[in-house]
Image: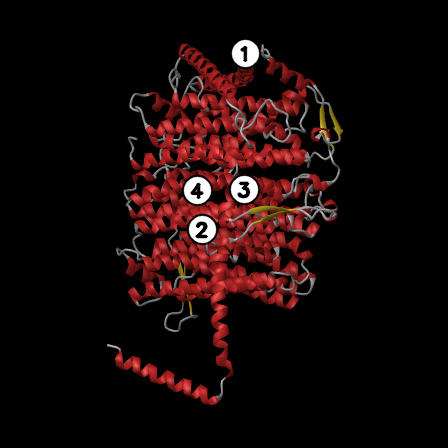
Amino acid sequence: MSAITGLLAGIGALLVTALGGIAFGRHAAGRLLVYGTAMLLCSAMAALALAHLLDPAAAPSTAWLPLGLPWQGALFRLDALSAFFAVVIGLGGAVASLFALGYGRHEHAPGRVLPFYPLFLAGMNLVVLADDAFSFLLSWEFMSLSSWALVMAHHQERDNARAGYVYLVMASFGTLALLLCFGLLASASGDYTFGAMRAAAQGSAATLPVLALALLGAGSKAGIVPLHAWLPLAHPAAPSHVSALMSGVMTKVAVYGFIRIAFDLSGEPQWWSGFLVLLVGGATAVLGVLYALMQHDLKRLLAYHTVENIGIIYIGLGLALAFQSNGLPAAAALALTAALFHVFNHSAFKSLLFFGAGAVLAATGERDMERLGGLIHRMPMTAFAFLAGCIAISALPPLNGFVSEWLTFQAILQSPELPQWALKIMVPAVGGLLALSAALAAACFVKAYGIGFLGRPRSDAARDAKEADAFSLTAMFVLAGLCLAAGILPGFVIDALAPAMQALLGERMPLQAGVDWLSIVPVAAGRSSYNGWLVFAFIALSASLAVVIIHRFASHARRRAPAWDCGTPDPDPATQYTAGSFAQPIRRVFGTWIFAAREQVEMPPPGSTAPARHVAVVRDLLWEWLYAPVAGAVAFASGRLNVLQFLTIRRYLALVFLALVSLLLVLAIWP
Amino acid sequence: MALMPDLLAQFLQMALVLALAPLLTGFVRKLKGRLLRRRGPPVLQPYRDLLRLLRKEVVLAENASWLFRAAPYLIFATTWVAAALVPTFATGLLYSWSADLIAIIALLGSARFLLALAGMDVGTSFGGIGSSREVMIASLAEPAMLLIAFTVALVAGSTQLSTVAAFMGSPEVGLRVSLGMAAIALVMVAIAENARIPVDNPATHLELTMVHEAMVLEYSGRHLAMIEFASHLKLLLYVSLIACLFVPWGLAPHGAGPAAFAAGAAAWIGKLAAGGTLLAVFETAIAKMRVFRVPEFLGAALMLGLLATLLMFVSRSL
């Protein structure tokens, strides 16, 4: 049995599991059945895809099913790129299912979640395996709609209906753009299979409409600015394990869609495509993290932060396009490896963080950070795993987030070779934006962790929180371990990605397995090298050394006393810093322009005993300037066209007649 | 065993930075005192302070968590590792190949991340104010630092500090506009990162103006000693970094004999003394700025770094 058959069988089994979800959705057994089966299936599929990725002799394996377009059927293909993304999906799905085995206990409407959950997993897997435009778009819509159903699982809650609506509109927009994109690609060959498109594009230059439509279509699903508006609404609305899948995995499927079109199907990349993607990526990275810093809803903060990471991935992709178009495949391989490494990393730590947020939500019923605090005492294990996720996502060594950003920086340092002036100016600017977003991400997660887990509890719910269950904790620790492993032994990941580079770019990064001491050397030893495990070992060693020496030779006396706080400690937890006050300096520095942030003090009239109020106003200018006018125009037009619903039969007939006459006129005049 | 001398040189470096870090701080303090026509504390005072703190018991706030107790050791360890990676008296040390300049910046970022979290752990308003301002300063200083790293990396064709230092010491560097800008930006970043005047005042305990001191307000005893030691190390690291990038003369090459090492160490101590003197004079001559003027100061460093990088993209000879 070839790998692709196995994966398709797994997808079929997931679809069958959905039936089980319908049948047993209301029983406790349904949860165990659906999540347990999904976990096993996803692990098996991840293992199968990983074996295909690591097998040096593996050729792309294909399959054909008599579904879809009658003259063509549905084609599926597993190559190195699909295999890598199938590993990411399988791994994310398996861990999310493990988490849900415990977390699902808190679900009050399991009948709305269980049937759609396996469908969602199946949809994502189908997208990366599809090998013709029809099955790709069908799987894409299938993935969108099943995740929409999961977003709407808690439809009674405030704002969720709006989140679902915005998601549906944006998903339709994205699919429309992709449909047009595939239409353009197919027009060259007259065939909807990817193989025909690839053959037709061979040697020809990519065109702007194709790239722009791919960027719009796949980018709206991935959450690039300014098409990200739905993401921070929809991702937090879903149950937490689904949020983790949407943020950690589904956005990566969208990235896959873009890579497949831009690098594989649309012909030779052009330098302006790199420019365009870099521009979008840089803006997305910085705006995403700034938006995240302004949030005090934990899950929404994480969702906005996904936008930032998508920006980092797109920066890598833009660099790869720029290098590839200028005949620098080795540098392109470095940039694309950095992007794909970040895809893997982000799926690991973002899932971990959403699991942590879910565990907090289950324990306290709160997503608002202003009502959390002190959870490190009540939920020590969750707090530890969440801390690992925070360090990883802030791109700090020795965890994995640092390695992929380091590789992206190394790729940026290759770029003075680029001949185009636009790129010469753009790349350092994007490097600055990437550095800025990395520093702001650390600020963002100091805030998230410091307000949510440290300090004193700000509400009764936070004070009485209980540790998460064993399944949830296992899932979180598996991911934390993965973050550490990928951070200290990055060479293995880079080598595993090499077949995908070879297939897409015709070049790969130097083999890392043979480098001394398991260092990674992206270009040449004299140029740059990084050794994760040595750094980790040295930090661990010197910290232990300090602890041992101090406790052996110096004092180890310890006393507990009230906090010092310059002599004026206040027992009221409201005197702590809040999420809003923590972000205030950054809001002042960056936000006055980007968010039109204003602070005003409202003083009560003289003699009144009402308290004075300090109000910070942060506006979403993108929504106000881009979305609100479009929505207003649509509402206006539909209001005007509404008249057409209430005409008499005479007038309808007259309209039909007029339409016919004008069409005939057009046909007559048409040259 | 070709490994043994390499290993020995590396351990020598790690021990030297540890031994000299408090001395540099003491020297700057003494000099500042003299410049203000005070006698100033003895040069060895930081060692005595550290020993005294180590001998004292730790007074922990009632709701301090494990993070609060673990953070000082981790901060110390990360800063020490970062300091061990910067060429001080010799280049090409054994351990220097395991991380480059970008990784050193990120290691310092890890230390700061933990310190900012530790500041928020007890749940006091001063800890929060310190952490909040620290991350604001870092959000500008870190990108500026990375852009400086880009500039020197593009000049030298490597992000590896040993290679960069060797290149900077060779005659083919010449005078470059971009390096000048990077040097100014690096000094500005170093001042901000080490909480020196005009960004922060290491001597003040005036609550509303302090940044670094506000974060460590709840620390005492050996924990405070570790954090103080880490900040001494950080100052030494930045002075050594500026020295190895912009005055790389006297560095012993890889595999040199003990005589070259001794000469390198003498040169390094001379550079530290010069750096410390300049810092003391600068701090005495200038007043602390308001917190919300800091973004302008660091914004200038960021722009200089960006401009320097941009120049390198425009022409490799600028």
Q: Distance between the residues labelled 2 and 1?
A: 64 Å
Same-chain check, marks 4 and 2? yes
Same-chain check, marks 2 and 3? yes
Per the image, the residue denoted by label 3 is A588
Q: In this rendering, which labeled residue sits more in front, label 3 or label 4?
A: 3
For the residues bearing labels 4 and 1, Cβ distance under 8 angstroms: no
Q: Quadrant of the N terminus of chain A?
A: bottom left
First along the sequence among labels 2 and 3: 2
| Picture coordinates of residue B88, whole percent (x, y) | 45, 19
Q: In this rendering, which labeled residue sits more in front, label 2 or label 3?
A: 3
Mark 4 surroundings within 10 Å by alpha-carbon count, few (fewer than 14), some (14 through 19), many (20 or more) = many
Q: What amino acid is labelled 3 in the image?
A: Arg
SS for tag 4?
Answer: helix
Mark 2 surroundings within 10 Å by alpha-carbon count, few (fewer than 14), some (14 through 19), many (20 or more) = many
Q: How far apart are marks 2 and 3 (CA)?
A: 42 Å
Per the image, the residue denoted by label 2 is A84
Same-chain check, marks 1 and 3? no
Q: In which quarter of the image is residue A508?
A: top left
| Picture coordinates of residue A412, whole percent (x, y) | 38, 40
Per the image, the residue denoted by label 4 is A433
